[in-house]
Amino acid sequence: PSVFADVVQAPEDPILGVTVAYNKDPSPVKVNLGVGAYRTEEGKPLVLNVVRRAEQMLVNDGSRVKEYLPITGLADFNKLSAKLIFGVDSPAIQEKRVTTVQCLSGTGSLRVGAEFLARHYHQRTIYIPLPTWGNHPKVFALAGLFVKTYRYYDPATRGLNFQGLLEDLSAAPSGAIVLLHACAHNPTGVDPTFEQWEQIRQLMRSKTLLPFFDSAYQGFASGNLDADAQSVRLFVEDGGELLAAQSYAKNMGLYGERVGALSIVCKTADVATKVESQLKLVIRPMYSSPPIHGASIVATILKDREMYHEWTIELKAMADRIISMRHQLFEALRAKGTPGDWTHIIKQIGMFTFTGLNTEQVAFMTKEYHIYMTSDGRISMAGLSSKTIPHLADAIHEAIT
Ligand code: PMP
């Protein structure tokens, strides 16, 4: 018998498992609204033109080799990534108070940041929003942090529970880490307003709570890279410290290339240097150094004015298509006279709509309409098209009536 005979079958990942079930379904009308990946109007994955161009340039550059990157990754990529999130004129960058390391997409950046905090920060409790991306609690707990939640979403309004959020953060122990979604909160699509961000900032700074921003959708929420980084920049402007995890999965469509960055903004350049030296000790035994290809694509695009511009146009087109799907779905439900208030579909932003459909309704839609989504009723707007919207509207209508 196998020495592993006692290993028990683990459940599928709640998000990736949706795609596994979808792939097994032979129905020609099936729709996958589970995974957060952009699809074209034809339902196809999209490689941005500017990414194809950058790859071509990299292939044609005969001087490029496949040597290891340093532990912290591609230096150009790190500098440009910091500028992208904190702004080109960020004083924190000019004062060399920011250390940025290339990591394995958003997930790897969160994990490296969390491992660093578990080793070197005095307060090991992290508060995450309720609900949040399903991987967050696991990433932080396995890194050695204690995970607690703060109220975020109000099912009654399908909006922000701002009062609950303020109460829970006020009650958090001084110094606690707080995970904040920079924009396009996943799974709810509900973000604080700018004024609310400012209140959150004041509260957190007065209680010395440490912000850890997760920025997986910069440019994807509004179509504008600067607008979607406002929350983070607000916290940098006050001179305080914070962490930020960036992903290029969605905004450059580099999902499988696993390109991301962790930045830690410190009070002084001296502290930033020491912090970076410790980040290297976190990374080296984990995977030695990050992969070169995806980061080279990003650096090629970010450092060239014309390619950067092309990227912003393609990014805006993706964001606009998602926003248009929101309007089309909302209109389709209105046209059918589906009972209830569906305005949250157009109010929420980013890749997902938190529909408010319950587990039974989701199961019904999967069984009868072959529509796949996570059981919390989250649908990926990026997986919809003008062709599939009527089918989804029919399914929602029947599920709730
Ligand atoms: N944070 C959030 C909120 C996300 O939605 C995602 C992607 N689903 C990530 C982080 C990380 O994704 P990746 O590791 O693919 O960059």
Image: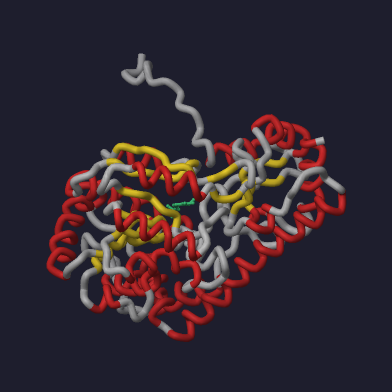
Query: What is the count of numbered marks?
Result: 0
Picture colour scheme: secondary structure
What percent of the width, then of the height, locates residue 149?
41, 40
User: Closer to the camera, 276 or 151?
Assistant: 151
Q: Is residue 10 left or right of residue 23?
A: left
- Residue 243 appears in which quarter of the rendering? bottom left
Tell me what residue is drawn at x 81 percent, y 54 percent.
332
Q: Residue 156 at x, y = what percent?
A: 63, 42
Q: Position of residue 271 (x, y in %)?
A: 15, 64
Q: Horizontal and vertical percent for residue 356?
A: 66, 41
Would you identify the image quadrant in which residue 80 lies? bottom left
Seen at 33% across and 64% down, the residue is 292
Report the quarter where the N terminus lies.
top left
Residue sitting nearer the eye, 351 or 211: 211
> Which one is in front, 213 or 311?
213
- Side of 176 where 272 appears, left or right: left
